[in-house]
Amino acid sequence: MALIVQKYGGTSVADCKKIENVAERVITCKRQGNDVAVVLSAMSGETNRLIALAKEIQARPDPRELDVLMATGEQVTIALFAMAAKKRGFEAKSFLGFQVPIMTKPLFNKARIEEIPSANLQDALKAGVIPVVAGFQGVTKDEDITTLGRGGSDTTAVALAAALHADVCEIYTDVEGVYTTDPNICPSAKKIEKITYEEMMEMASLGAKVLEIRSVEMAMRYDIPIHVRSTFTNTPGTLVVKEDEKMEHILVSGVTYSRNEARITLSKVPDKPGIASSIFNPISSANIAIDMIIQNTRAGDLTDMTFTVSRDDHDQAMEIVKEAASKIGAEKVTGDTNIAKVSIVGVGMRNHAGVASQMFDILARHGINILMISTSEIKISCVIEEKYTELAVRALHEGFGLDKPSLQGK
Ligand code: ADP
Ligand code: ASP
Ligand code: MG
């Protein structure tokens, strides 16, 4: 008998019929003798709908009230699920974030989980009740409702699996696992049987939204195996686990892309000590994460500084940078939201030279200009014009032989 945390995403609970299907699946797992705790997302599209409502009233919604609003999405699905389980003769009890409680830091819209006292859930499990927990939300010690950032239900699920010492965290979604690239834009994408935490973390941070990055970080820290699989079939999915020797033989495991990118350039900045901190300190104080940074020296004592932020943060970052630019005497600030980032990821890259040049070569052969480059031990990312995103993903997927099944999962 195992203790399993099962998380179902938005498309899996998109309407009452689908919620009843999820209830059937959870009950089947219980009937097989397992203890199950369930985490649910809001119905697909619901969180976007709630954000759009908020924006009808305030262009940049008040962060605290936005969390109160967004948290309602998951409240609906957990209550309906509990009803569907009870209808089938099984006891289930819904838990909102504060009822667990999922304690977070007081940072609205991007809160981090600090602690999950598990007594309430343990009591439910001991009594044979299926606890069904609202994903994505938490509570601060001052009793404010917080949310964990988009896609945050994955993090709720892994955090609960860690708190309950579960044997596995199963993430149910609308695809059969983690693929070599997004199967919705590249039909030749192949399901990966096993992927390391590190590769999955890179893939998630570089745009493969099938798992939220913090959920993978947490799974790695607490050694929780994640099984990503489909809500609509019984096929085994992808295991996200510790690296073993065999996995290092795969050079490139996946190709990812992200359109949630924006580039900001400060031109003709006087080149002297302290300029980088005068630009980037106010941005980080506003909790905006900076990704790539490039500094080019011009003739004279002038330099250009270019960096990327997520597109959601572009407008706010531009305001901040314009103010900083006038203080340090930069000539011009320009923003560009028509960019995307394509990346290749693989632990095997650590021990192989020439992967980067192969990537640049493939992009060049398809007439795609590279605007920025960044690398780490196990990934290479290129910023390109957004209109080439799908072309680049398909070209890299094919160019690195990921469409050939023999290379995968072996
Ligand atoms: P959920 O609502 O279940 O949390 P998401 O939409 O967040 O589901 O994540 C699943 C989606 O992730 C898939 O439908 C797919 O389009 C996208 N995706 C992007 N990259 C990948 C990848 N490498 N493997 C699988 N899915 C991916
Ligand atoms: N409902 C939230 C979102 O759409 C959280 C999640 O689905 O994981 O981002
Ligand atoms: Mg998701």
Image: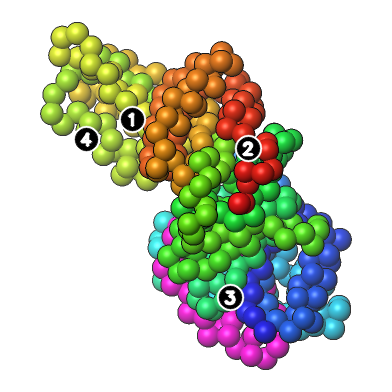
- 390 or 21, nearer to the observer: 390
Quarter of image, res 371: top left
Give percent across and percent down for residue 217: 46, 58
Q: Residue at x 57, y 41 (%)?
A: 254
- Residue numbers of the magenta segment: 109-135
Crowding at mark 2 (Cα within 10 Å: few <14, some 14-19, many 20+) = many
Find out whether the residues at labels 3 and 4 contact each other: C-beta distance under 8 Å. no
Q: Is residue 405 above or below residue 34?
A: above
Q: Residue at x 43, y 65 (%)?
A: 221
- 257 or 283, nearer to the observer: 257
SS under mark 1: strand
Q: Is residue 370 above or below residue 354?
A: above
The circle on residue 277 is 4
Find out whether the residues at labels 1 and 3 contact each other: C-beta distance under 8 Å. no
SS under mark 3: loop
Disc 4 from disc 1: Cα separation: 13 Å
Q: Residue at x 77, y 59 (%)?
A: 235
Residue linked to disc 1:
293
Q: Residue furthest left?
A: 273
Disc 3 from disc 4: Cα separation: 45 Å
Amino acid found under the numbered disc labelled 2 = Leu
Crowding at mark 4 (Cα within 10 Å: few <14, some 14-19, many 20+) = few
- 351 or 186, nearer to the observer: 351
Residue linked to disc 2:
402
Residue linked to disc 3:
167
